[in-house]
Image (spheres, rainbow, N blue to C red):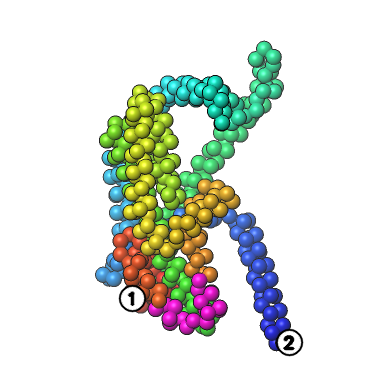
Amino acid sequence: MSDRIRSAGSVAWSLVGLLILLALLGFVAWIFRVIFPPLVLAGVIVFLCNPTVTRLQRHRVPRAASAALIYGAVLGALVLTGLFVAPNVSRQTDALATEWPDLQRDIEQRVDDLAKQSQDGNWPVQIPTYANIEKQFAPSDAADTDDDGTVSPAEQKDRIVRQFKSVRAVFQQVFHVGLIFVLAPVLALYLLIDLPHIRRVLRGLVPERNRSDVMVITRRLSAALGGYVRGQLAVSLLVGVMSALGLLIIGLPYWLLVGMVAGIFNLIPLIGPWVGAVPAIAIALSTGGGTHQALLAALVMAIVQQIDNHLISPMVMQRAVKLHPTVVILALLAAGSLWGFVGMLIAVPTAAALKILVGQAWRRLALDEPLDEIEARWELDSESTVSGGFVERVGTDVGPDADATGLV
């Protein structure tokens, strides 16, 4: 009994020490949080490019030359895409900017009509007027005006100062975002070139008795996260293209802009077409298309959503991260409520990583399964569900600097 008590106490103190260590690491990470956005974007680029660099390395092309070729090919593809897409985007953006006052007046009128109908018809839910909605989201400037509607000099000065601070904050955000997109490709290039050396260093830091477990875990994490990143980008591109083509067929104005909105928001699984349906329906109702075109736009986005849910996304969710749709939805809700849009972006890969870590710990510690059986089961599952396509496993370099363990 005393040995069990001593063992339980040792485990409890180990957990306390681990929690303290995680808290310290979290505090340090919060202090240096500015470095994480470019690192995360660089990691995404590495996950995207490393399989191709690895294939070129199999053909005895140096990693530096392989990375340079991939960067050149991606840059060329972006330039060609921009040459074909940019004119349409620019033309539709200019047209939307020109027609925006008329669209806004039409939207205001429709919202006010719905508000009047909800009040006259005793609807269960009363729809506010456009002025009331605008007042809820507008800054509180009521105290800035006198009774005759004029603005005092002091309040006018304060308003100018606030506007200047807002503009400065916007410029700072634009600068930070631009810096991220400049630094991330440079960091990714260095990581791609030095990845074998980084693996050897990390593998050497792992104690010999735990090295096999760490190898299996990192290989599974590499396969799941790499497959998810590449797969979700491909899914978002397909959703954007399908949405834009469908809206073009029904003759909706600004079809390309709406398709881009749907594709970008589909980086969060399952919601892209639903988000894209809102501007599509609003544009149809406000540009003379009427209820008929609005219904067609809603039908197009619903069809895209069904294709995404039943044909495309399962390739990523089930083959790469192996998460049930219910788990995906719950992870999105939990992460979105805690960290907003960024939380929804990282919800699925985080859930997949936790599933791998908890599953490995349970099999090794609770079930006491041998490591070779765990790895053999995972290998069989990987060959049948993960290999091939744009969710292919990553991190399996060849040659003297490679090992079959993924990232470590």
Label 1 sits on a secondary structure element that is loop
Tell me the mark number nearer the camera, choosing from 1 and 2: 2
Tell me the number on the disc at residue 399: 1
Q: Is residue 14 above or below residue 85?
A: below
CA gap between label 1 and label 2 equals 52 Å
Res 377 → quadrant:
bottom left
Callout 2: SS: helix
Q: Position of residue 164 (x, y in %)?
A: 60, 31
Q: Position of residue 240 (x, y in %)?
A: 35, 44
| N-terminal-most mark, 1 or 2 | 2
Q: Is residue 354 above or below residue 299?
A: below
- Residue at coordinates 53% horizontally, 79% vertically from top-left? 367
Does the residue at mark 1 contact the one at mark 2 (Cβ under 8 Å)? no
Position above or below: 156 against 181 = above
Quick one: 258 or 163, which is closer to the camera? Answer: 258
In the shown orientation, is residue 307 left or right of residue 109? left
- Mark 1 is on which residue type? Gly
Q: Residue at x 33, y 69 (%)?
A: 384
Type of the residue with mark 2: Ser
Residue occupied by mark 2: 2
* Other-residue count near label 1 (Cα within 10 Å), few / some / many at <14 / 14–19 / ≥20: few
Quarter where residue 89 is shown? top left
| Residue 178 percent coordinates (x, y) | 47, 45
Q: Residue 102: where, in percent of width, then height?
A: 42, 21
Could you say which is closer to the camera, residue 143 or residue 204?
143
- Magenta span: 359-376
Dominant SS type (magenta): helix
Q: Which mark is residue 108?
A: none
In the displayed image of the protein, which residue is found farthest to the top?
148
> Is residue 340 magenta-colored?
no
Write the residue at 60% across / 30% down.
136
Q: Which residue, as the protein is rendered here, is positioned at the far right?
A: 2
